[in-house]
Image (tube, grey):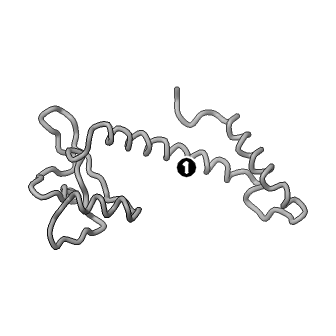
Amino acid sequence: MGRDYCTVFGCHNFSGRIEKFGHKVTLHKLPKEQYARRAWIRAISRKNWIPSNYTRVCSDHFISAEVEMTRRIASARIHVERKMEQIKNFRILQGVIPLALSKFDDHVFFVCTALTNLLPPLVAE
């Protein structure tokens, strides 16, 4: 398995590298959302360059608060996805809801989400 490298001109960081201050370099994919993606490409400022799916930018090119915020968002997203999976596991949501009950589908979903709050927490406190 090869290493991922930072695409910023003059930067020689790669995944897993430990900086002199003891923090591990992390590599980040370009955003999929076009407005943010164009901003990243402008900031990289390489002439005649087209990014690929493998393009990465290392954490040294971000403010540490931005990197920490990204980590927290990613962590929360994982837990939200796991919670959504718990909601989908309710048998009533796995099949077709009868037409007679369709006007109550919001209420059914609300009750299922409320019941997941009674399950053990996904994250240990």
Between 121 and 70, which is closer to the camera in this rendering? 70
Between 64 and 114, which is closer to the camera in this rendering? 64
Seen at 9% across and 55% down, the residue is 10
Please give left or right for residue 63 compared with residue 79 in the image: left
The residue labelled by disc 1 is 81
Coordinates of residue 105 in the picture (x, y in percent): 80, 56
Quadrant the N terminus occupies: bottom left
Coordinates of residue 71 in the picture (x, y in percent): 38, 41
Q: Residue furthest right?
A: 100
Coordinates of residue 21 in the picture (x, y in percent): 15, 32
Coordinates of residue 62 in the picture (x, y in percent): 25, 45
**Up/down of 46 relative to 90, above or below:** below
- Three-letter code for the amino acid on which mark 1 is drawn: Glu
Q: Quadrant of residue 38?
A: bottom left
Crowding at label 1, few (<14), some or many (≥20) Cα neighbours within 10 Å? few
Seen at 85% across and 58% down, the residue is 103
Q: Quadrant of residue 6?
A: bottom left
